[in-house]
Image: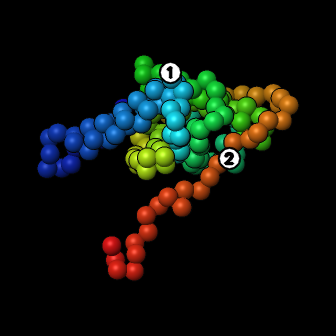
Amino acid sequence: MSEKSPPPDSLLPYEAWSEDAMREVALRALEHAAKHGMPGEHHFYLSYRTDHPGVAIPGHLKAKYPQEITIVLQHQFEGLFVDRVAERFGVTLHFGGAPAKLVIPFGALTMFHDPHVRFGLRFTPSGLEEEKAGLPAMPEAPAAPRPAPAPQGEVVSLDAFRRRPNKDGG
């Protein structure tokens, strides 16, 4: 997963290990949902870098969200999978009534949040430096044919979930 170098005074990559451990929590939650469905009132907000190497999304979504997108896994999603070998997960969501298959490398995740239990994690995306250095990115998934309109998913702002300091400074 993460390949960060250790701090200058450390010979051990504690930051990378911590980041990997936090990603593991999110991945286990995704695996559980893929195998058993979403339990109770749980639902996940997942933010990820759309410009990360290996991200596969339809072109119209890439054009609309060139750097980052937040998706919601709650009631209407299909084909959720976690591929540990390829270090990625995927899901099909509906945008504007059309299904869109999303494939997301673990390293592209920037945030995992389950508002039902007020649990959230933030991640530093890995691998963007390699893409900037000229390594080719994975091809985008082809746009899906448009079926009959269905209830649509939505991309939401997470501003309501962010902590704001109160006037006392705490």
* Image quarter in which the C terminus is found: bottom left
Q: Earlier in the sequence, mark 1 or mark 2?
A: 1
Pointer 2: what residue? 154
Task: Give the amino acid type for the residue marked by disc 2 in the picture.
Answer: Glu
Where does residue 86 sit, x and y in percent of width and height? 46, 22
User: What is the spatial separation of the Cα atoms under label 1 and label 2, in whole angstroms?
Assistant: 24 Å
Name which quarter of the figure residue 167 lies in.
Answer: bottom left
Q: Residues within 10 Å of mark 1 (few under 14, many from 20)?
A: few
Helix, strand or loop under label 1? helix
Task: Give the amino acid type for the residue marked by disc 1 in the picture.
Answer: Lys
Where does residue 142 sit, x and y in percent of width and height? 72, 28
Name which quarter of the figure residue 159 lies in.
Answer: bottom right
The residue at the point 54 percent across, 56 percent down is: 158
Q: Residue furthest right?
A: 148
The residue at the point 37 percent across, 35 percent down is: 25
Residue 17 vertical position relative to residue 89 in the rendered view, above or below = below
- What's the coloring here? rainbow
* Image quarter in which the N terminus is found: top left
Q: Nearer the viewer, mark 1 or mark 2?
A: 1
Residue 19 vertical position relative to residue 28 in the rendered view, above or below = below
Q: Residues within 10 Å of mark 2 (few under 14, many from 20)?
A: few
Q: Are marks 1 and 2 in contact (CB under 8 Å)?
A: no
- Return the residue nearer the eye: 65 or 29: 29
Label of residue 35 in the image: 1
Report the side of 117 relative to 101 (left or right).
left
The residue at the point 18 percent across, 50 percent down is: 8
